[in-house]
Structures are given as structure tokens and as C-alpha cells.
Amino acid sequence: MTRYISPLLAFLIGLSKITAQDVYSIYETIPNADIPCRVMKPIKFDSAKKYPVILSLHGAGGKGTNNRKQLKDWNRQLADPKRRNQFPCYVVAPQAPGLWNGEQLKIIQKIIAELPSVDLDRIYIMGHSMGGHGTYIYIQLAPKYFAAAAPSAGSGLKRTEEFIDPEKIKDIPIWAFHDSGDDVVPYQESIRIVEEINNAGGNAKLTTFHENSHDSWTAAYANPELYDWMLSKVGNH
């Protein structure tokens, strides 16, 4: 399924006035973790409740070890108070020095398991470009761990653990996003992988933008419909 949402409209819906310094204070550093990682707690946290988790995988621009570069872009949008009140959840934002891989996933799962009041049946994953590719890799490595996925400009082209196998991820609800004029990650690859997943009996849909840009994350992750859809999915962890 291909749908079109105006990137400008979607961006205005989710426009955040959060500053960089605000983001660094809202996303708390996880001490003594084996990879750099920050976590944003649910707003108005109540220990008597259980909260879903969004795992947010940065793109190539967030690579490094300083535990800061991964907090730009949509992680700032997610820190907006209106968004946090509308969709109370944890956001886990790790940082990788290169492509996302299975060893990092094991560390991330350990971090999530140690968060208080986590709903382990409602763990979601999203990411753009390198993070979109990582999203496909991670749901393939742990298909029963994630309740839904929202990759942006992710193709599954490059090899980390292995190429994407639609049979392994067909049972995970997937809402993919891509710009038809993307000159960094080929748009046709998103069409291909969504078709292959659905041909295998899967549940994937693709929203296409037409801005001739690699930046499909702005409109995709500013859209509150995505979070209504994603947080409604329940897995079987």
C-alpha cells in the first residue's frame, strides 16, 4: 500500500521547540553500558503502570562514541512534551560506531530488560537510512521480540548478519517510509522488500514521499498516525 502525506504538514504536526541542550537532559545516559546509550523515560512516570518501548536507531550521521550525536532528528521530535503526553513510552537511543549488528542488539535488549515498568509485549523499533536498514536486520534477528517496526529509507541491501529474509519477518507489522527521489538509498529497494514480505504472507505497508530527498524521516516520524498505529500493536515476547 502506498500513501502520500505532505512532508510539510507532517512536520508541522510534530514540530518541536526542544533545544539540543533540552534533549541531552531529557535523554538520560545509561551508566556502565557496553555501548553508548541514552533513554527518555515516560513523562509523568508511574511505577504502577507498564510502558511500551521505542528503540530508535540512528542513521550514519549519528555514528560515533560520544553518546550525543544520535539524539538529533526524530529523537528531538519524540521529546516534545505534547508528543510525550500523547504517547507515554520509553525511547531507547543507542549509538553505534558503524552498521548495526547482533552483538549490539543483545546489549540493547539487556538495557531494555533492566528498565522499570517495561511492557515486554510492546517493544517497537524505528530508524532512518542506516537505522532503517538496522531495523530490518534487528527484526530478522529477533522476530518475536518486536511488536512492530517503522523503517525509513531502509533497504536491507548491505550485509551485516545476512541479507533480509522476508519469511523471517513476515509476521511483524511493518510501516515503511521512503522518498521516490532518494539518491542515497534506492527507493525501488523499499518497494521490493515490502512486496516480498507481503508475497510471503506478511503485513507491510509503504508510504511514499515525493520531495526528491533522502530525508523521509522528517515527515514519517512527525506523523502522529504512526504512533497510534505502532503503539496499538502487541507482540508475544
Image: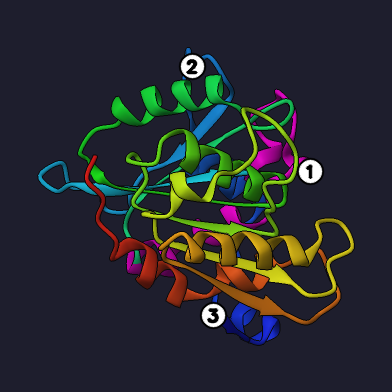
Residue displayed at 72% across by 33% down: 159
Query: Seen in the image, is 172 located left or right of residue 141?
Result: left
Residue displayed at 34% across by 69% down: 86
Residue 173 circle label? none
Asked if residue 160 lies in the magenta stretch, the reply is no
Name above or below for residue 180 compared with residue 68.
below
Where the C terminus falls, by quadrant? top left
Predominant SS of the magenta segment = helix
Furthest toward the left, the residue is: 48
Q: Amino acid at mark 3?
A: Met
Residue displayed at 24% across by 56% down: 234
- Mark 1: secondary structure: helix
Task: Give the residue number, with chain letter if any, for mark 1.
Answer: 61
Name above or below for residue 119 compared with residue 12.
above
Q: Which residues are magenta?
A: 59-86
**Depth check, front residue: 218 or 84:** 218
x and y, in percent, of residue 108 in the image: 46, 28
- Of labels 3 and 1, earlier in sequence is 3
Q: Amino acid at mark 1?
A: Gly
Question: From where the camera sits, is residue 80 visible?
Answer: no
Task: Give the residue number, with chain letter if any, for mark 3.
Answer: 1
Residue displayed at 78% across by 82% down: 210
- Mark 3: secondary structure: loop
Task: Give the residue number, with chain letter if any, for mark 2.
Answer: 33
Name above or below for residue 105 compared with residue 157.
above
